[in-house]
Image (cartoon, helix red, strand yellow):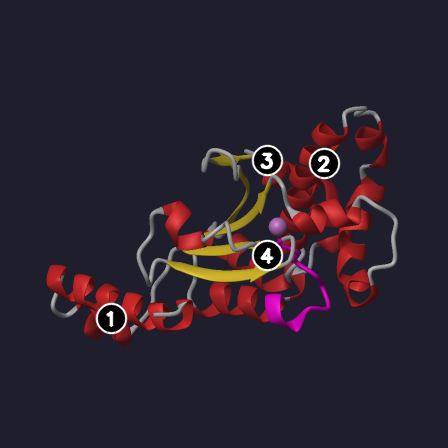
Amino acid sequence: MNIYQQVFENNKKWVESKISHDADFFEKLAKDQTPDFLYIGCADSRVPANEIMGLEPGEVFVHRNIANLVVNTDLNVQSVIHYAVVHLQVKHIIVCGHYGCGGVKAAMVPKDLGLMNPWLRNIRDVYRIHQDELDGISDTEARYDRLVELNVREQCINVVKVASVQKRYYHEGYPTVHGWVYDLHNGYLKDLELDMEKEVAKIAKIYDLHEDF
Ligand code: CO
């Protein structure tokens, strides 16, 4: 059996194991989804959202792209956020980066990468915003790790720039936004413990859109 056929075998076994624990598993799941979490992570195959969080189908709404970016003109991520906040009313929005991120690494080197240029530009912009701090780190690996963390922080800030996020937060007190980094070497998630209240206060006079509602 080749790897392609194997996937369908795996799927069959997975269905059987779910049903063996709960005969109505899929019927219940098909009715509705009420996840508490929106997870925005890297597309990297080594960082499977549900698995690292120990969550079942139905418990986390997931969006993944290269280097977990929240880009203002990306209709995909903006639609995901809007749907998660307005319709699913998630309680938490997580931006999860990971050490060893190929997208972040590529953005650390000034080089023409063709179609990837506009996407990676967003990470280069994060570098520019934090240039003083990053250039103060002489060890390349440590600088790389720090850019992964700063990229997560900037993407969290991009999440709170979204009008629907602000509106829901001011009216209901949620969603709260969290920045995480996953470590490929040991499997642990690190909460960057970002003070988003403080981050929002710093930029509110520029980005606060909720008064218009
Ligand atoms: Co990555």
Residue 12 image label: 1
- Of the 4 image quadrants, the one containing the C terminus is bottom right
Please name the residue shown 49% across and 55% down the image.
Answer: 39
x 28%, y 70%: residue: 9
Q: Which mark is residue 166?
A: 4
Q: Nearer the viewer, mark 4 or mark 3?
A: 3
The residues tagged by marks 4 and 2 sit, at their Cα atoms, a distance apart of 31 Å
The residue tagged with tag 4: helix, strand or loop? Answer: helix
Mark 2, other Cα within 10 Å: few <14 / some 14–19 / many ≥20: many
Query: Nearer the N terminus, badge 1 or badge 2?
Result: 1
How much space separates mark 1 and mark 3, taking CA atoms? 44 Å
- Mark 1 lies within 8 Å of ligand 1 (Cβ measured): no
Judging by the rendered image, the residue that carries numbered circle 3 is 195
Q: Nearer the viewer, residue 39 or 10?
A: 10
Q: CA distance from mark 4 to mark 1?
A: 43 Å
- Location of the N terminus (image quadrant): bottom left
Measured in 3D between alpha carbons, the distance from the residue under mark 2 to the one under mark 3, in whole angstroms, is 22 Å
Q: Residue at x 22, y 71 (%)?
A: 26
Disc 4 + disc 1, Cβ < 8 Å? no
> Label 1: how many residues lie within 10 Å, few (<14), some (14-19) or many (20+)?
few
Instruction: Specify start and end residues of the magenta stretch as a single range.
Output: 68-77
Residue 71 counted in the magenta span: yes
Give how far apart the Cα atoms at labels 4 and 3 are: 16 Å
Q: SS class of the residue under badge 2?
A: helix
Are the residues at dot 4 and dot 2 in contact (C-beta closer than 8 Å)? no
Please state the horizontal and vertical placement of residue 13, each as a whole percent of the image: 22, 65
In this picture, is 10 found above or below 170? below
The residue singled out by tag 2 in the image is 144
- The kind of residue tagged 4 is Gln
Who comes first in sequence, dot 2 or dot 3?
A: 2
Dot 4 beta carbon under 8 Å from ligand 1 = no
Query: Amino acid under label 2?
Result: Tyr
